[in-house]
Image (spheres, grey):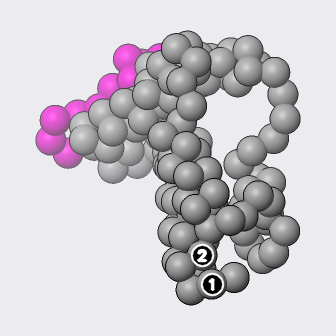
Amino acid sequence: MSSDADVWMWLADLILGLHAIFILFVVGGQILIVAGWVLGWTWPRHRLFRLLHLLAIGFVMLEAWLGFICPLTALENILRTAAGAVTYGNGFIRYWLHQLIFYTAPSWVFTLIYTVFTGFVALTWFIYPPRRKL
């Protein structure tokens, strides 16, 4: 691989990592919100955290409803193409991170999952609301 290809591949891996962090924020954030509710923590009621969390999963659900490809996925694919890569053939972390994030199922399954999860996030917004000041 040339040095240009190395740079493109590195940028694609960076986007994949950001994608994983986004997913961790959405899923892990909801786990922490519910845990905070059960355990009486105050920080999961921080208004900005809760708003960003709701907007993040709402964006994912809207993408699914409209049939849009995730911008992070599209950007990663562009960068991998620029690097001349077609597969995740090398790199342990790259391979397993990709296996964790992308799995095969019909698109309606993901739309249903995103919609139900967004409903759960919205429900916790109302039954365990954020606070302006903690």
Residue 80 image point, x, y percent: 63, 60
Does the residue at mark 1 contact the one at mark 2 (Cβ under 8 Å)? yes
Residue at image coords 56%, 52%: 78
Residue 128 on the magenta span: yes
Measured as percent of width and height from the top left, residue 81 is found at 63, 57
User: Which of 3/91 is in front?
Assistant: 3
Please give the name of the residue rendered at 81% of the width and 21% of the height, measured from the top-left corner.
Answer: 106
Counting labels gives: 2
In the image, what residue occupies the spot 32% across and 44% down?
A: 49
**Amino acid bearing label 2:** Ala
Q: Which residues are magenta?
A: 123-134
In the displayed structure image, the side of residue 111 where residue 62 appears, left or right:
left
**Where residue 121 sits in the image (x, y, percent)?**
49, 25
- In front: 30, or 61? 61
- Vertical comparison of 100 with 129: above or below: below
Q: What residue did someone put label 1 on?
A: 2
Query: Image quadrant of residue 52?
Result: top left
| Residue 47 visible at all | yes
The quadrant where residue 94 appears? bottom right
Looking at the rendered structure, the kind of residue marked 1 is: Ser
Residue occupied by mark 2: 5
